[in-house]
Amino acid sequence: MAQEIPYKIYLEESELPTQWYNVRADMKNKPAPLLNPGTLQPATLDELSQVFCRELAEQELNTTDAYIDIPEEIQSFYKMYRPAPLVRAYCLEKALGTPAKIYYKFEGNNTSGSHKLNSAIAQAYYAKKQGLRGVTTETGAGQWGTALSMACAYFGLDCKVFMVKVSYEQKPFRREVMRTYGANVTPSPSETTAIGRKILEEFPGTTGSLGCAISEAVEVAVGTEGYRYVLGSVLNQVLLHQSVIGLESMAACDKYGIVPDIIIGCAGGGSNLGGLISPFMGRKLRGEADYRFIAVEPASCPSLTRGKYAYDFCDTGKVCPLAKMYTLGSGFIPSANHAGGLRYHGMSSTVSQLYDDGLMEARSVEQTAVFEAATKFARIEGILPAPESSHAIRVAMDEALKCKETGEEKTILFGLTGTGYFDMVAYQKFNDGQMSDYIPTDAEIAASLAKLPQVD
Amino acid sequence: MAQEIPYKIYLEESELPTQWYNVRADMKNKPAPLLNPGTLQPATLDELSQVFCRELAEQELNTTDAYIDIPEEIQSFYKMYRPAPLVRAYCLEKALGTPAKIYYKFEGNNTSGSHKLNSAIAQAYYAKKQGLRGVTTETGAGQWGTALSMACAYFGLDCKVFMVKVSYEQKPFRREVMRTYGANVTPSPSETTAIGRKILEEFPGTTGSLGCAISEAVEVAVGTEGYRYVLGSVLNQVLLHQSVIGLESMAACDKYGIVPDIIIGCAGGGSNLGGLISPFMGRKLRGEADYRFIAVEPASCPSLTRGKYAYDFCDTGKVCPLAKMYTLGSGFIPSANHAGGLRYHGMSSTVSQLYDDGLMEARSVEQTAVFEAATKFARIEGILPAPESSHAIRVAMDEALKCKETGEEKTILFGLTGTGYFDMVAYQKFNDGQMSDYIPTDAEIAASLAKLPQVD
């Protein structure tokens, strides 16, 4: 019954999803609600609407509707760069000599270089619909900032990006892509916000952090008429938008009779992983099918595998709602030699709950092993992967090599979230043999977790 | 009869070309043959085979076979990143308010970032088949070097790239991508070749040029057992391989009943333009259809619009065969402020002959106008284009705006050859308002042309 499987499966436009899938509707244990940082009570729609666009705040709180319509305008934009291909990694299988069948969903075929655009365009759309003038956000490596800049250019919205200072200086090209899309990019911490000035006073030479950039972006959004704050990961609304990854993957699998045994995604804040696995997880939750899910995180920032499931702050300035999540503590910063992205201290509440319920696995990998996999993959499959994506490649290869030993013909699906064109400093380090690994000690993690807020 | 046209047309794998199209077979006036630089007589197969792989030399000389089979192995590799989508630029049409229908063939969805991979994989295949150990080449901006590195990694061939020194230093990321694919990258001019040492002695501070890098690459290829030289543009064999662009475009057009009135491509050495237009030109040459073809070149390097149709050297060291082409003289170097690629002094013999026969038009555009178009296109269509590709965008927009004035519903097809991720230095110049134009004077061009070799 299954047709011959092409190298790359592109769905027809008529087969593209017209609704996002909200996995929370099928979860027996819902993810814990966001808390108002002032009252430590569940944040209400009105409270969230001060920070986020109203409809996005509604999506954030919606744990009951399994499907939410994708507005026409967003569907149109999706058609400019989607469907993303589901690729059969024939060459990689051959090179590994594995009986496993390996597929990857490639989200890098757009200028932002990653899956981030799936949610950026949705968030920009709702901001525009609400009549806002602009949005603010933070960016570290720059994929999210680029995606949001593109989305804002499309809808004619102002876009203010706070970019972690060290990235601003070390990744001038990322910055220029955002500027080309008309965004205003400020290195963080900056003199333009109260929290930025405070941090600069306390730590004059600081090169910034994601948590600090979030605080600055939120401050500007809340304090400027006609602006809201938008975020590229962690939130439930982001996982909702990213479900297009999983929905397309599932439609392509169903069309060709492909049944994945293992589904693998890299995990920083959880946006890609959550989006990829959601619809498959839905089937598992409804008892319609079973899959193994594996979240892959860096050994240097191991929130799922070594963190604590607890309420924590999402930002340094503690102005954002608190989230219950697997966390290393909001003060945790991966060691300076960490090059491979996925450096957020916490993890999406939804992913955290699914993991806590034993519905998925997690694994941590060291960065030299990740870059080995990345380089091998680039040479064999022709795509230069983002370091983040390469965490998933590493584990997909490992699983395929296990199949080689056991002779099992498992079907492995992984998310290839993006491309590494702006990560060549890290690749150079690896090419020059200068890359090393660092695994935080138990004492370091314990010290960071000791500062968790007291909630419950 | 035509189906509704999707944003992006992806052919099925079964619809992909299995043969390249050789436009020379349908040309009444064949392009002039390459000349041996020593004897100034037409280069023979044996002579060419000293420099190029044998089968590639055969393709170079083949002016009679209209179709040449694409070997299975190359077809397989093509399937890893092809078909390239034919995109309907609905958003651009709307933004311009034009009744014209605009399509572009997007060749940037692969790690080399451009169409160059189409020929790189073919040349690497024939090198492997011949039992060679490796190949040498030159690269300027780096797209070709990257493509060749990828192709060589795939076939396990050694790859030595001479990269123009100024690019080597200013584009470290391009260099790292090549290294990631296992290539050996040397800044040119270098101490590793006789010609390099000679040039360094004469011009100690030189930052290199494409013509010089070609000479070094050829010297190493000819002087090393088991190596040949490969080139990414200009040659007939390259246009042959690049015909996949045009063949796919034509198949997609035919499938959906699209009939282009105007076909536009940027032109440096002619690889993309020649590949895109070849099959359409074939129809025109056979009297089956008519199209307007427009080659777009930089005003700062205007070989078609202001050069001379004559035999000239292809490289600085004068070790390559001579080609009859529209040329500005092999000593011509575009002004230092030129940022937009397409800086080769000559033009493919095939394209030159077609142009000389009045079968196509040429237009030159200034770089600030090109980057304006590029930025607009990026914001509207979501793809960050390479500066080279943006020459075609500029003229496609201009033609669409003419339609707005006249009310004509013309169908415009242009080649979007690649992405600009590694060209952010040029974008930054433009974003900062620091980009300027330079048009060479008649006297400058005449002085360069005065040094053309005496042939005929």
Image: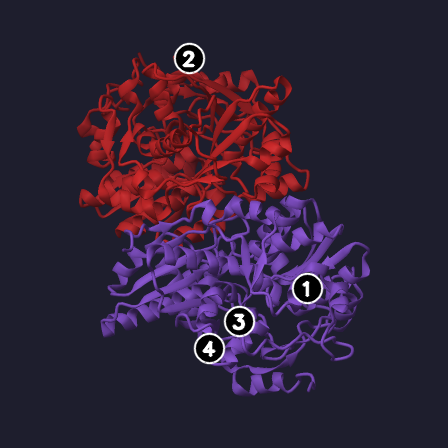
Chain colours: A red, B purple
Q: Nearer the viewer, mark 3 or mark 4?
A: 3
Under circle 1, the secondary element is helix
Subunit of mark 3? B
What is the x, y in percent for residue B220? Answer: 77, 60
Residue A238 in the figure: left or right of residue B52 = left
Residue placed under numbered mark 4 in the picture: B359
Q: Nearer the viewer, mark 4 or mark 2?
A: 4
Residue at point 31% right, 59% down?
A: B92
Residue placed under numbered mark 1 in the picture: B58
Q: How would you rate the neighbour count of disc 4 (Cα within 10 Å): few for under 14, some for 14-19, many for 20 or more?
A: some
Q: Amino acid at mark 4?
A: Leu
Residue A197 visible in the snapshot: no
Residue placed under numbered mark 2 in the picture: A358
Quadrant for the C terminus of chain A, please. Answer: top left
Q: Amino acid at mark 1?
A: Glu
Q: How would you rate the neighbour count of disc 2 (Cα within 10 Å): few for under 14, some for 14-19, many for 20 or more?
A: few
Residue placed under numbered mark 3 in the picture: B26
Same chain for mark 4 and mark 2? The answer is: no
Residue at point 62% right, 44% down?
A: A428
Residue A127 in the figure: left or right of residue B55 = left
Q: Nearer the viewer, mark 1 or mark 2?
A: 1
Q: Earlier in the sequence, mark 1 or mark 3?
A: 3
